[in-house]
Image (cartoon, grey):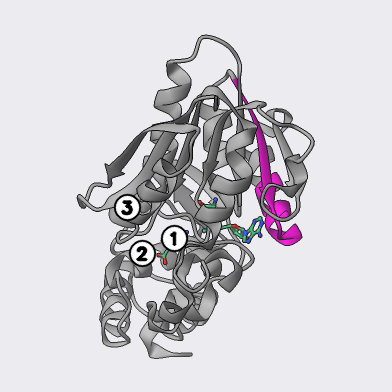
Amino acid sequence: MDPQATGNVADVLQRTAARFREAGVDAPRLDAELLLMETLGWSREDLYRNPEGELQESHAERFESLVSRRVRGEPVAYITGSQEFWSLDLRVTPHVLIPRPETEHLVETVLDFLASRPDPCRVLEVGTGSGAIAVCLAKESARAEVWATDVSAPALDVARENARRHGVERRIHWLRGDLLAPVRGLPGCFDVLVSNPPYVPNGEIPRLQRDVRDWEPALALDGGADGMDFYRRIVRDGVRHVRQGGLLAVEVGAEQGDDVSRLFRAHGELRRVRVRPDYAGLPRVVTAERVQGV
Ligand code: SAM
Ligand code: GLN
């Protein structure tokens, strides 16, 4: 057996974190803890309460196999099959983008808007991936009925499973197809159109962090030559699906706040364009309200 994984919990964590650090892993200690929790079926509290616990040989072997996957660059969320988002435990597979903490700002923005509306609300999410946004909105707002689209059938399977896991499957409708094509027959029907579309300029994909570039689906990242393809299509084909007074809300890359707001302002039926920063102070969410054209 590999000596790296033998010993007590505290020693194993320390040695694994050092190994991860050497391999250039971003959050070495956290990742070591998550993989040990997965191996032992323990919570984080269990880890902290039992630093002296000795690993059984079978656990040590299993842990070593997970650790070596991480050393090769595979993200922890794909190794464990889960990621926490908005305090919900979500299933993830390599068919879906791993939900990012920044995207919680988008969820929060939409929830604030829904709270200001008196009646049941129809929400359309385009590019749902793991279903992180759709599931959170349905879970947090009992008045929301959600339609969520994705072009990827395996991603929709994951999203459906997440909705079941969190008891909101009856308030989410899943639609497979290219962006707004699945809702073509329903103009002006939604109170909110929300999306975290692929937005990485394709020339930048080779320069992304290795874990993202080599492991996450290109389909979830590639936003075309300037990263703006999906925003242009959402504005062109999506605004007419938003009710008068309804909200369009998108996540943007840190450099895209100005370009996306300009695109929104240039559309005759969008008003009150706003850019919201994330906790790091970077532009992260752009919103606008729909007004009817004259
Ligand atoms: N909403 C999830 C989140 O915020 O974590 C996933 C967002 S991911 C950046 C973008 C998603 O858009 C992916 O799930 C991808 O499959 C989907 N997508 C890519 N091209 C699409 C298209 N033409 N029509 C619909 N969805 C598309
Ligand atoms: N935020 C993602 C990244 O870290 C990009 C997600 C997207 O394209 N919407 O690369």
- Gap between marks 2 and 1, in whole Å? 6 Å
Q: Amino acid at mark 2?
A: Glu
Is 145 part of what is drawn in magenta? yes
- Gap between marks 1 and 3, in whole Å? 39 Å
Q: Position of residue 211 (x, y in %)?
A: 44, 77
Q: Which residue is mark 2?
A: 33
Q: Which mark is residue 257?
A: 3
Quarter containing ligand 1?
bottom right
Give the structural element (helix, strand or loop) at label 1: helix
Q: Which residue is mark 1?
A: 37
Q: Quadrant of residue 162?
A: top right
Q: Which quadrant holds the C terminus?
A: top right
Give the structural element (helix, strand or loop) at label 3: helix
When the figure is inspected, residue 64 is found, relative to residue 254, above or below; the finding is below
Q: Position of residue 43 (x, y in %)?
A: 42, 51
State which region is magenta: 144-160
Precedes in sequence: disc 2 or disc 3: 2
Give the structural element (helix, strand or loop) at label 2: helix
Q: Residue at x 36, y 64 (%)?
A: 33
- Gap between marks 2 and 3, in whole Å? 36 Å
Q: Position of residue 4 (x, y in %)?
A: 37, 86
When the figure is inspected, residue 30 is found, relative to residue 271, above or below; the finding is below
**Residue at the limit of the structure toward the top, as seen here:** 118
Q: Are marks 2 and 1 in contact (CB under 8 Å)?
A: yes
Q: Amino acid at mark 1?
A: Met
Q: Position of residue 229 (x, y in %)?
A: 53, 62
Is 215 part of what is drawn in magenta? no
Q: Amino acid at mark 3?
A: Gly
Q: Is residue 70 visible?
A: no
Q: Residue at x 44, y 70 (%)?
A: 226
